[in-house]
Image (spheres, rainbow, N blue to C red):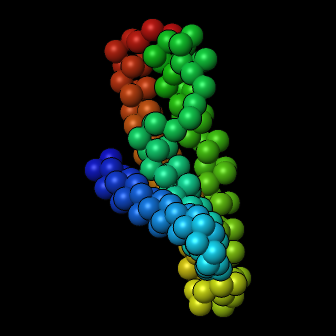
Amino acid sequence: MNTIAEKISDFLMNVAIVALAISLGAVVLQVIGRYIGVFFAWTEDLTVYPFTWCILLGAASMYHRKAHFKLDVLDTRLSPRGRLIVQIIICVLLLFFTIPMTIYGFELMYRFRNHKWITMPVKLGYTYVVMPLSGASMSFFSVCHFLTALKELRSTNKTGGTN
């Protein structure tokens, strides 16, 4: 399961990198356009929507890699067993966020499936696909982390790990 999670995380990160490159390219084009006096109306949409994809998919990938922003106040004060318990609690709490994010993301995507961007003939439904994709990915990664931590906790209990 962790191999699948790694491949999904790598794919999400690659899509996030492409989305960031598109967004950055649109920003550069906006700046050049303003400098030479030409207005490209579509660059605003092409800046915002791919950047949203970059953030949400990058956050999912970084969560899997455990490289996402975190406070390690508890990590430094807890035993290895205590850290595993906190990690299990975090995984469960995250599911309370990511499962509704997935469900309502599908609803948002469906609701706006026929609406189009203001400046381009792209349907907003395609834009909002990132919400359920990111939520489902984070849910999957959370389950993977949960099972790994639970397995480690059980092995710690069998070997008589410290409290």
* Residue at figure coordinates x 63%, y 75% from the top left: 37
Report x, y in % for residue 11. 36, 60
Report x, y in % for residue 146. 48, 40
* Residue at figure coordinates x 45%, y 16% from the top left: 80
Q: Is 86 placed above or below 1 here?
A: above
Left or right, 82 with respect to 3, comes to right
Q: Is 88 placed above or below 48 here?
A: above
- Foreground: 70 or 123? 123
Quadrant assignment, res 162: top left
> How many numbered dots are placed on residues in this image?
0
* Residue at figure coordinates x 59%, y 90% from the top left: 121
Left or right, 151 with respect to 42, comes to left
Q: Is 38 placed above or below 75 here?
A: below
* Residue at figure coordinates x 28%, y 50% from the top left: 3
Report x, y in % for residue 132. 58, 67
Left or right, 24 with respect to 161, comes to right
Q: What is the residue that sits farthest to the left in this orientation?
A: 3
Report x, y in % for residue 4. 31, 55
**Is residue 4 shown to the viewer in this render?**
no
Left or right, 144 with respect to 138, comes to left
**Is residue 36 shown to the viewer in this render?**
yes
- Foreground: 160 or 121? 121
- Foreground: 68 or 36? 36
Q: Is 85 placed above or below 19 here?
A: above
